Image (cartoon, coloured by chain):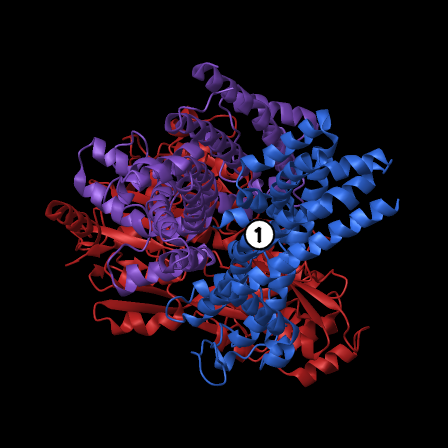
Amino acid sequence: MAEQKNWAKDKNNARWDNLARGLYRFRSNRLSMLGLLMLLFTVFVAVFAPLIAPFPEDASGATNVLERLQAPSETHLFGTDKVGRDIFSRVVMGTGLALQVGTVIILLATSIGVTIGAISGYAGGWLDDLLMRITDIFLTVPALVLAIAISAALGKGIINAMIGISLVWWPGFARLTRSLVLSLREEPFVEAAYGIGAGHARIIFRHILPNAASPIIIKMTTDFGFAVLTAAALGFIGLGAQPPTPEWGAMINDGRRYFPDEWWIATFPGLAIWLMVFSWNLIGDGLRDVLDPRSRR
Amino acid sequence: MFKRTLSLCLALSLLLGASSFVMAQDNILLYGGNQDIDNIDPATGENYSINAALRSLYDALFIYRGSETQPHLVESWEVNDDATVWTFTLHDHAVFHDGSLVNAEAVVYSFNRVLAISGAPSWRWETIADENTAQVIDEFTVEFTLTQPYAPFIGTLPQLFVVNPAIVEANLGDDMGQTYLKQNAAGSGPFMQGRWEIGNIYEFIAVDDYWAGWTGDDHIDGFFWIIQRDPSTQLNSLLAGETHIADTVAGSDKEKVVDSADHIWEEHGGFFTNTLKMNNQGEYTSDINLRKAVAHAMDYESMVAAQDVPITILPGPTPANFVGYVDGLDYPEFDLDKAREYLAMTPWPDGGITLDYVYVTEFPREEIPGLILLEGLAQLNIELNMIPMLWPDMVASCASPETGPDIINIYTLPPFLDADAHLYNQYHSAQWGSFNSCSFYSNARVDELLDAARTIGDAETRQAMYTEAQEIITAEQPSVWMYTEDSSISLNTCVKGFRYSPMYPLTVLFQDMWMDGC
Amino acid sequence: MNIRFYILRRVVLIIPTLIGLSLLTFAIARIVPGDPVGLAAGPRATEEIKEALRREFGLDQPLPVQYIDYISGLFQGDWGQSLYTRREVLGDLRAFWPATLELTTAAVIIATLLGVPAGVISAMYRNRLPDHVARVLSLFFVSFPSFWLAMIFQTWFGRDLGMLPIGKRLPVLVAPPQATTGLFLVDSLIQLDFATFAVSLRHLFIPALVLSFGAFASITRITRASMVEALEKDFVRMERAIGIPYRVIIFKYVLRNALIATVTVVSLNFGWLMAGAILIETIFDWPGLGLYAVEASLSLDFQPIMGIAVLYGIVFSVVNILTDIVYGILDPRIRYG
């Protein structure tokens, strides 16, 4: 028993060492650090939005038609929209929403995908076959097409858009988790745990999944940006948030009618999306190098 | 190396080189239309773009030119004293595109088909006609015996487009030819269908020896209805000479059109009327004081400033420039103090309620007033829940008071120039269920007045009745009266023959257009 | 295993997947909260008219019956009718699909032409400046919302510089070439109509370029990774040792090996871009499946949406099979089993 504990401790130490080494390598990757800085910036903006935005009420229903369609100026850094709302305030106030949307989608998709993938890989047999066939069905159609269909069917609204996207996002996680579980299932420490009579749930959650965490985390990070993009796309089509919610995709759609003469209405929300997505993509790229060293030599 | 550079240059010049292809062609009018023409069946289709197509492909008994209703297929007509029996003599030389004659039988067939299908255009006749109304008297005489007197009948007839019975019968299917006629014309109009690229462009080719002749000095050989969903695309194409007419250019871009030497901006007051219908049977909006509070919380002047199109504030039930308008009634204005006074008389003196505001999705002209009302109501501690919907869903929600939203943004266009046209379909309780009457307003005296006025010929007596009805309606505030939209359309100066008509304010009468030096 | 038998087996295996897919889309279509019949019947329809429509579209049948009707129709070429426009879905798909196919194919070609060289250069200059530049650039472009970038490009090239058309596949007055494939570039070449070819190429260029950015990053990354792997193989080292020029090695031996992985990514991207085309088409008034899909889903017209999903499913599966075949050509060692 004592020996077993030591072994577990060693394993934990090894994990820590790996992590420390990884962190070092991540830190030495300037691009990823830039991405991290950009991400921290967006989080900062999201948290302190009401303090940063000069007209926070413009995100929740105030209008000022006498100052409509004004070009960027000192008062209105990013200009104003069709009813005189301050674009800068709306972009700032929308940051938190975008982060939330991305987080919810990724967490939902991960939990569905990892559960299905783990069950599939661990159980094998007909259950594996069945689950993988279902996963395949989702993978046969581009995610955006299904997401549009599901969100449209559920009805317009940002919650339904998030549900719609999550429901088509999980198959990637399921496939990944399954393949990880398949290879880990044969590892000696899993067989050892099995040998001392650990239950299935315990084996999956305590022994297999923690060791499958790195690739899953990489995928969560790299997918985050694309989830934000997809949500913005639904907003752009008109399936997202309802007014006056400052959702970036919907703001671009709003500004489309005024583009290019009143270019600022659509331009700044677009740049905001880009900033957020780019930061996640840089981080994801860096993490891939750190956690999966084969990908970059 | 040299060879490769050369071919690269060649490819680039092909790709980017000056436009070597034909941009415009003599005498073909290129029209940038904001809306698709997704249905050309006269029995089911009705909106500005569909009507523009129907007027071109079909002929009707009458036709609007400017604000006049002129006989078209009809040569002469008679009506009895109480406006129930209408007898029309048709031209004897009007022919369908397949050469057969447009006769009384075709008129009766078309009228009955509209009634039987009961699609969008049929509301004009549903309350005044049945399947026995239209009768063939002889080859070129048709008689309509209405089920009740109806003085403004002729005003409804420009929408009665005559279909070729032989073609419809040949393509009847199991839906009275609806599937076929949605995409295929069976008419006698000045144009025939050419290239018909669904959702993209539609070509109309002029009929050389059009039976009615052409009104203008000259006529176009045809036109293309090019769907351009973006107003900015419309503007750019117009200014670049890729189109000759753009029907939806944002008001804020007016100067760009005016400043370019060879374009004109036509702007006219119209009767395209916007109102916020409040559900008079609804949980909150059945309270008259709440309705008054809402009407006084709307910042009308801001709305004028914020709308992309030029608009004129609508004082009450009838536009100030329309038949039957009554001056000097107690029409509401933006006044938050007054709004608070009214609110104090409701069961919710401190607000704390949420009202739904339903409007057409992706339509800023309906979103903007909502945003302004939202701000005004917030001062009263009333929340406005903005719900964008598709137009057909909105219409469906107007089916009954139970499904009717608290507040719904509705555009109405009077079908003809008569006080009846604005008042009856919006405020008569028999009209419940149609989007026009989505306020579910009901007042026995108003019903009585509106019914009686329909049967009377004398203009003064009628006006007295309409005045009394409007006094009652104004006092009860069933809706928030918003504005009438001024119509604007941008044309290249080489396009001639444009004449503004309040009956189709968003487009042109293609058969009267011609081109000079395009 | 014989390759023909292999392909046949793959084709047959598509069928269960498609049945599953049709079940999925059918389920989605039936959770619609709105009233699709009210929509189809029009503003003033009475309850009787709606009832008649329900009968006509079989919506009064129990769900399993409806589904079986639908699935058997699919196999007989009856993909249902749009509730709203009353047009046959299959006919609509036939009309709109070539536009999307042309756009997507062009985008995939552009992405490959940009991405593969970028990946090769990255691998050759591993961890040096060109590598970093390619990496940042690909991440840079893939992070833009494509519909936003489309708007910007449309304005720059179409309006400000006036170099390229603003939208659509052809100018209004240029009649589309006689349809053989529906792809204007191909059809105009068949007709030897080079003017139309040039014009439609001009219309295609910007939408396809913007669309291609979505695939640029992954193609670059995979090409680079597999190149690096190939470069470290023994035979490459040996060839370098015996003095074969580096350029020759790269192009003659390494690239061929690396292309196998790239083919997979390119084919995967084909599917993604076909979805991305939905957004691009709305900006450029490109009359393809995207515009069709957006309008159908906004109006809750589910028959077309189900049709689009099934069509995408078929295309995806076919592309996958084609990929496997190309695999085999590139790498004769692969055995079909």
- For mark 1, name the chain: A
Q: Is residue A187 left or right of residue C195?
A: right
Q: Residue, x 63% and y 64% (percent of image)?
A: A97
Residue nearest the observer in this picture, B199 or C118: C118
Q: Residues within 10 Å of mark 1 (few under 14, many from 20)?
A: many
Residue B193 percent coordinates (x, y)? 31, 39
Residue nearest the observer in this picture, A78 or A34: A34
Badge 1 element:
helix
Residue B320 percent coordinates (x, y)? 49, 73
Residue nearest the observer in this picture, B177 or A163: A163
Q: Is residue B67 visible?
A: no
Residue nearest the observer in this picture, C18 or C45: C18
Q: What residue did someone put label 1 on?
A: A223
Q: What is the tally of numbered marks visible in this picture?
A: 1
Corner quadrant of residue A238:
bottom right
Q: Colour of chain B?
A: red
Q: Residue, x 29% and y 31% (percent of image)?
A: C179
Kindly indicate which chain is depicted in blue in the rendered structure.
A
Q: Colour of chain C?
A: purple
Q: Quadrant of the C terminus of chain B?
A: bottom left
The relative height of residue C162 versus residue B130 in the rendered view (above or below) is: below
Residue C38 percent coordinates (x, y)? 61, 42
Q: Is residue B204 left or right of residue C94?
A: left
Q: Is residue A131 visible?
A: yes
Query: Residue flagged by tag 1: what amino acid is it?
Result: Asp
* In the image, farthest residue toward the front: C241
